[in-house]
Amino acid sequence: MRYASTRGQSPVTDIDLALEAGLAPDGGLYVPMHIPQLAKAAPWPDLASAATAILSPFFTASRLCERLPQLCTEAFNFASPLRHMHGERDFLLELFHGPTAAFKDYAARFLAASLAALRDNTAPTRTIMVATSGDTGAAVAAAFHRRAGFRVVILYPQGRVSPRQAHGLECWGENIHTLRIAGSFDDCQRLAKTALSDSELRARLPLGSANSISLGRLLPQIAYYGHNACTFFAEHGQRLNFIIPTGNLGNASAAFLARQMGLPVGDIHLACNANDTLPRFFQGQDYAAQTTRATLANAMDVGAPSNFERLRYWHDSDAELRSAISASSSDDATIRAEIAAAHTHHGITPCPHTACGLAALHTLRKAGDHRPWAVVATAHPAKFESIVEPLTGQTIPLPAALAKSLARPAQGEPLANDYSALRQWLLALPSQG
Ligand SMILES: *Cc1c(COP(=O)(O)O)cnc(C)c1O
């Protein structure tokens, strides 16, 4: 498989180079030259086997090809259970059973394992740049912590993540550096992108990306959609439809790829928060990136979703894209109401992001949709206890992995929302370690 840039101005490359580069040299996002077909896929016994089968066609001609089963076993070592919520057709796809209790653990672990396997032991330390609206940074930090030859620089918007999320970003040390930026997530993302496209900087400091713009983050996410959709299809003879809490559009792009590969994924609905750039587009308005607004579902506080560029690339027109995917938005009052109602009526405690998904499901049901839908539960509610607990009146038990990271001391540094400040900070890093 070969990979091209969405902007068409970069040389076609292979997956190994695309993984190491993150962003294409022309500032575009890497995309596979064609989408492999897996229509005859049988249900797989577990997620790691599904991941191996689904990812294999993307890794032909890769140095990782033969090690793929091992990499998938390492990365996909926690389950993605599809739970009945209530009734016969409402499901919750729980993706938060990993080390930092968010779905991003899957892809971060796969990317870290892949980059480590690709690494030449004599190469200089590679600095992975990651802008985070809360969960990415922790997942990437956990995945790269103490991996020889790698260092991670996390940029997160100061004051815009929950206290537990902030701790989860700052609790690592050693090869993980955490910078609190006086700005929004979009500012952090812009800083990271600017560094990654600064060729003079890259010549002095080998960089890499771990944001959802990286193919190494996007592709592994196809696995849990494919695995659960195939299992569901084998049992029910029906496609499973997905409601996906959406910010930067990485997770939903993976669901879209799963469907394009011929896997039995049905409709895809994007559940956004008050940052409604995507709902506006999918409801027919021209695409217009917006200034980010802070909401209770902060990992989705994105006004200019990066992966939109990929979705546009995969469609001939905006009209075609609008017929492939739908979207809706929930404000903070709706998020609060959904959390309280889910707890009272169904004994479920969703995180604020998952609550946007539940709100979208309610709207679909009210409109008379009777098909099976899985709301993707993107994070464990214990990460957002300061929002969720007052609404449910109950303490959320802490998953073991979160308890462990909260027990470590926090260590982060403030940095101005200014590229020259970041550049200077990066150039002062030691060349090794
Ligand atoms: C990152 C994140 C999202 C949004 O996922 P995208 O791939 O950016 O669309 C939703 N919920 C949680 C909990 C997240 O961490």
Image (cartoon, grey):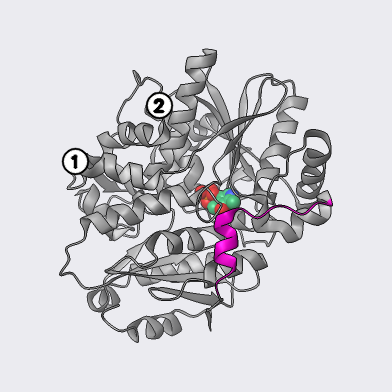
Residue 281 sits in which quadrant?
top right
The location of residue 332, given as percent across then percent down, is 76, 53
Q: Earlier in the sequence, mark 1 or mark 2?
A: 2
168 is higher (above) or lower (below) than 223 = below
Q: Which residue is mark 1?
A: 66
Check if residue 401 falls in the magenta segment. yes
Q: Residue at x 26, y 77 (%)?
A: 200
Q: Separation of disc 1 and disc 2 at Cα?
A: 20 Å
The location of residue 360, given as percent across then percent down, is 69, 36
Q: Which residue is mark 2?
A: 45
192 is higher (above) or lower (below) than 304 = below
Q: Nearer the viewer, residue 275 or 335?
A: 335
Crowding at dot 2, Cα within 10 Å, few <14 / some 14-19 / many 20+, comes out as few
Residue 355 sits in which quadrant?
top right
Q: Residue at x 43, y 80 (%)?
A: 422
Q: Residue at x 49, y 26 (%)?
A: 229
Crowding at dot 1, Cα within 10 Å, few <14 / some 14-19 / many 20+, comes out as few
The answer to whether residue 10 is left or right of residue 45 is left
The residue under label 2 is which amino acid type? Pro
* Label placed on residue 238: none
> Which residues are drawn in magenta?
393-408
Q: Nearer the viewer, residue 129 or 379?
A: 379
Note whether residue 9 is visible.
Answer: no
